[in-house]
Image (cartoon, grey):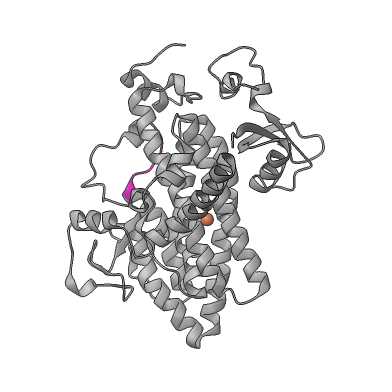
């Protein structure tokens, strides 16, 4: 049961910027969607999406919060 | 990446520097943050079984829903805090499922049984208020960026838990009779329980890394005062007896009982008449944990082991 880290992005209203609101561990994309929706339910989000951390490619720093994902095998 | 010495990092964070990754931390900073987050995560996690077992006393389907919504929030808060710990190199799996009940770091208050609706709503009114008091201070002052961001959600939801507690405390107080009696009885043991939760008085407190690393902003006594500054007026407004009052000369809330003092777990009663005890006695009681410690931890861990065993059997077959 190997879980992956998924980062959660959401915007509250139309026109708002998409913001990083947190992250969840999940077995696959489907459970990640459910965990994200249920865990970060503090707002009535206009839009929410998740992305597997290993898919994020850091551009200018290798020690930022999103850098850890690259070491995870796909 | 520039590596700071401990002294340099302390100076930087006091000046407003925000730490974003583990690479920037000194060993001391990381350790202090792990201790803080472990207490936070364990408190959120253990509030869930405590509230869950109390939720069966909910008086209607609507209140069942609100009680379970609070439990769901607490589990999400716990998950978020353990996830932050994982980023610091700790194992969530071990922290949640690998520890013995007495190794958890939540306050003694969440080792107590909540046995009726009055106790659940006073827990929301008092314990969740303590949670907000502690976490708002962390939110306003922490030098750790990922924690500050995570607390936006937590603060928002804790405010709902507190409102739930206050609304229901008001309702029970107004009803009078047995409702008010049960409410007062809950206040009698839960008020001193929460006061004690904030820990050693500043006059006895050993040097705290959490303040030096700017992981929090207020001292134990200051936090205790913040909690009392909203809880005592609430009780006064509801005409409930709370053993503390405002002292206009000292300009602070003062307790009307020997602090700290002994607690009779079975009778749910503070033994004011036996006088003040030492903080070593309190630490001993905390270390022994309270009556529901094993039951609560077991309820969180049990199925994990069982299902893991099924899956292993399946893999072996
Ligand atoms: Fe919480
Ligand atoms: Fe809460």
What residue is drawn where x is 45% and y is 19%? B23
> Picture quarter containing residue A4?
top right
Q: Main secondary structure of the magenta part?
A: loop
Residue A13 versus residue B115: which sits nearer the camera? B115
With respect to residue B117, does A57 lie above or below? above
Q: Residue B244 colored magenta?
A: no
- Specify whether residue B36 is in view: yes
Residue bounds of the magenta highlight = B214-220
Residue B228 visible somewhere in the drawing: no
- Residue at the extreme right: A14
Please, which residue is most extreme toward the bottom here?
B177
Q: x and y percent of residue B279 in the render?
A: 21, 55
Horizontal and vertical percent position of residue B91: 45, 35
Q: Is residue B72 left or right of residue B278?
A: right
Figure quadrant of residue B243: bottom left
Q: Residue at x 45, y 62 (%)?
A: B126
> Does residue B278 sit above or below B188 in this rendering?
above
Can you say whether B230 is above or below B208 in the image? Answer: below
From the viewer's perspective, tell me whether residue B266 is left or right of residue A8.
Answer: left
- Closest to the observer: B272 or B110? B110
């Amino acid at each position: 049961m190997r879980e992956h880290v998924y980062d959660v992005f959401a915007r509250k209203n139309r026109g708002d910027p998409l913001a990083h609101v947190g992250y969840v561990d999940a077995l696959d994309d489907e459970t990640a969607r459910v965990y994200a929706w249920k865990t970060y339910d503090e707002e009535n989000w206009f839009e929410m999406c998740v992305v597997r951390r290993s898919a994020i490619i850091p551009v200018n720093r290798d020690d930022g919060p999103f850098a850890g994902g690259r070491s995870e095998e796909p | 990446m520039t590596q700071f010495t401990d002294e340099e990092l302390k100076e930087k964070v006091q000046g407003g520097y925000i730490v974003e990754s583990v690479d920037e931390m000194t060993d001391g900073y990381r350790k202090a943050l792990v201790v803080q987050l472990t207490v936070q995560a364990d408190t959120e996690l253990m509030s869930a079984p405590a509230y869950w077992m109390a939720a069966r006393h909910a008086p209607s389907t609507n209140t069942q829903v609100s009680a379970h919504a609070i439990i769901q929030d607490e589990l999400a808060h716990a998950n978020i805090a353990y996830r932050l710990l994982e980023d610091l190199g700790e194992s969530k799996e071990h922290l949640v499922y690998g520890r013995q009940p007495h190794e958890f770091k939540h306050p003694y208050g969440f080792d107590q049984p909540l046995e009726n609706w009055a106790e659940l709503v006073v827990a929301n009114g008092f314990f969740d208020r303590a949670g907000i008091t502690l976490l708002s201070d962390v939110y306003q002052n922490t030098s750790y960026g990922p924690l500050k961001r995570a607390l936006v959600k937590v603060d928002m939801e804790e405010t709902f838990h507190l409102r739930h507690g206050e609304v229901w405390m008001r309702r029970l107080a107004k009803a009078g009779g047995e409702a008010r009696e049960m409410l007062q009885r809950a206040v009698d043991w839960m008020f001193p329980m929460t006061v004690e939760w904030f820990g050693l008085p500043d006059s006895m407190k050993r040097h705290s890394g959490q303040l030096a690393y700017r992981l929090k902003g207020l001292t134990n006594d200051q936090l205790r005062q913040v909690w009392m500054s909203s809880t005592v007026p609430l009780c006064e407004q509801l005409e409930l007896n709370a053993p503390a009052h405002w002292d206009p000369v000292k300009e602070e809330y003062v307790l009307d009982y020997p602090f700290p003092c002994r607690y009779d777990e079975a009778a749910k009663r503070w033994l004011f008449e036996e006088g003040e005890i030492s903080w070593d006695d309190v630490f001993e009681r905390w270390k022994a944990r309270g009556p529901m410690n094993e039951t609560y931890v077991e309820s969180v861990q049990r199925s994990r082991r069982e299902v893991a065993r099924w899956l292993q059997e399946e893999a072996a077959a």
